Amino acid sequence: MPKLFDIVQKRKQIFEGIMNSLFTSNEIEEIASMRMEICNTCSFLDTEGSKCTVPGTHPCCGHCGCKLKWKVRALSDSCPEAKWEAILSPDEESEVNTKIGYNLYE
């Protein structure tokens, strides 16, 4: 149950990471690549999926359980070990979502 609660709390960042994976840009891919280099050297990297919030979503962060393909592309998310920081604030994230026509509460 705690992992399901984590998904609900991080739904905006998860959606952002998915969208940035589907609709790529050079800038986001560059950021994702730099973040992934850091994740690849982290002791929390889970390549087998035993600590992933959702089974089958490895590689993931063994600390928070997030799928790394999406986490590193979510500009409003940060590493739980503070190895890289969010680039967007929650307000900036909301502004971007409004511009692209995404409203989580509709």
Image: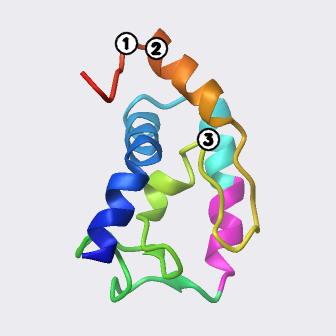
Identity of the residue drawn at 68% across and 58% down: 35
Identity of the residue drawn at 64% across and 53% down: 33
Give the percent coordinates (x, y) of residue 43.
63, 89
On screen, residue 49 versus residue 65, left or right, reads left
Secondary structure, mark 2, is helix
Give the percent coordinates (x, y) of residue 62.
49, 82
Answer whether residue 39 is magenta in the image: yes
Q: CA distance from mark 1 to mark 3?
A: 18 Å
Quadrant containing the N terminus is bottom left
Relative to 42, say whether 82 is above or below: above
Name the residue type under label 2: Thr
Secondary structure, mark 3, is loop
Q: Main secondary structure of the magenta part?
A: helix
What is the image's colouring?
Answer: rainbow
Relative to 97, say whether 55 is above or below: below
Secondary structure, mark 1, is loop
Front-most of 33 and 104?
104
Which residue in the protein does label 1 denote?
Answer: 101
Q: Evaluate if marks 1 and 2 touch, with contact meaning CB atoms under 8 Å apart.
A: yes
Alpha-carbon neighbours of circle 1 within 10 Å: few (<14), some, or many (≥20)?
few
Which residue in the protein does label 3 denote?
Answer: 75
Which residue in the protein does label 2 denote?
Answer: 98
Name the residue type under label 1: Gly
On screen, residue 26 versus residue 87, left or right, reads left
Question: The magenta stretch spans which residues?
Answer: 34-42
Identity of the residue drawn at 75% across and 67% down: 82
Q: How many marks?
A: 3
Badge 2 or badge 3: first in the primary sequence: 3
On screen, residue 1 versus residue 58, left or right, reads left
Give the percent coordinates (x, y) of residue 21.
42, 41
